[in-house]
Amino acid sequence: MRLAALYTGGKDSTYAIYKAASKGHSVEYLLTVFPQSAESYMYHFPNLHITRLQAEAMNIPQLTATSAGVREAELEDLKGLVAKIADRVDGLLTGAIASNYQRSRIERICRGFGLEVFAPLWGMDPWALLDELLDAGFEVVITAVNAAGFDAGWLGRRLDRDAVEDLRWLVERYGISPVGEGGEMESLVLYCPLFERRIEILKARKIWRGDSGYLSIEEARLV
């Protein structure tokens, strides 16, 4: 199929593209909605400006829109993006794993345009997913955390085997999702087999408030 990927720059949306490509599908566009609020129910918030570098690294055209991040109303912003390419693709690609809230709304948008929904990560065991993407050579950093057990030390931390073991402890103690499907954490892919070049973070600062925070990337480049 010809697909347009709903893209945040995180591990799930990037790995979904990787899985789709491995099955012979062609990702024609990246669709990214920039919410103006971290409280968005649908969209990734921190460091979305880096998706422009990721799109360049993958050599895939990117279409963007802004959203006030108001629940339900924010779906109209995505629909506006999909409308621009609906006659040029067969379906939408999503990195959803277990969020029925997101999947049901994406399905509703697709029905309106006569498009298929392709969700290659849906229902995957989260530990298997983490193992797969690390085995595939994904270089990922944690850019936001919002759950009990996390501290500022997680911001900017590389998601490697040691980090996965620490996540196991957090899951056992606090019951969080190991892949952050409930908003417990967000991530950024710096490199993967889809990228022709690697992203280098040149300047970043940690923003920590109470028991949550995010990494604000102020300067980055492709190398």
Image (spheres, rainbow, N blue to C red):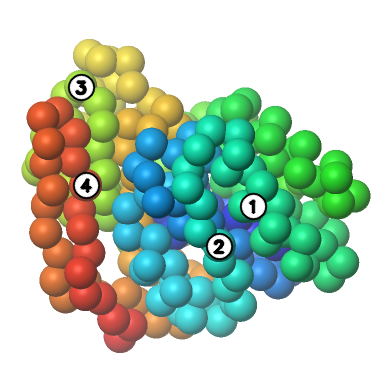
Residue of label 2: 65
Determine the CA span between mark 1 and mark 2.
7 Å
Tag 2: residue type? Ala
Residue at 25% across, 26% down: 147
Which of labels 2 and 4 is toward the front?
2
* Mark 1–mark 4 distance (CA, rounded to whole Å): 24 Å
Does the rendering let one see residue 157? no
Compare marks 4 and 3 and give the one earlier in the sequence. Answer: 3
Image quadrant where residue 6 sits: bottom right
**Label 1 to label 3: alpha-carbon separation:** 31 Å
* Picture quadrant where residue 216 is located: bottom left
What residue does disc 1 label?
78
**Which x, y percent locates residue 17?**
60, 59
- The Cα atoms of the two marked residues, 2 and 4, are separated by 22 Å
Local crowd size for mark 3, using a 10 Å CA cut-off: few (<14), some (14–19), many (≥20): some
- Residue tagged 3: 148
Residues at circles 2 and 4 in contact by the CB criterion of under 8 Å: no
Query: Within 10 Å of the Cα at label 2, are there few (<14), some (14-19), or many (20+) other Cα atoms?
Result: few
Residue 81 point in image, percent of width and height:
67, 61
Does 135 sit above or below residue 170? below
Could you tell me how far apart the alpha carbons at marks 2 and 3 are, in whole angstroms? 32 Å
Q: Which residue is mark 4?
A: 214
Residue 168 visible in the snapshot? yes
Q: Residue furthest right?
A: 114
Q: Are dots 1 and 2 in contact, CB under 8 Å?
A: yes
Which mark is first along the chain, 3 or 2? 2
Q: Residue at x 25, y 76 (%)?
A: 220
Q: Image check: 89 left or right of 122?
A: right
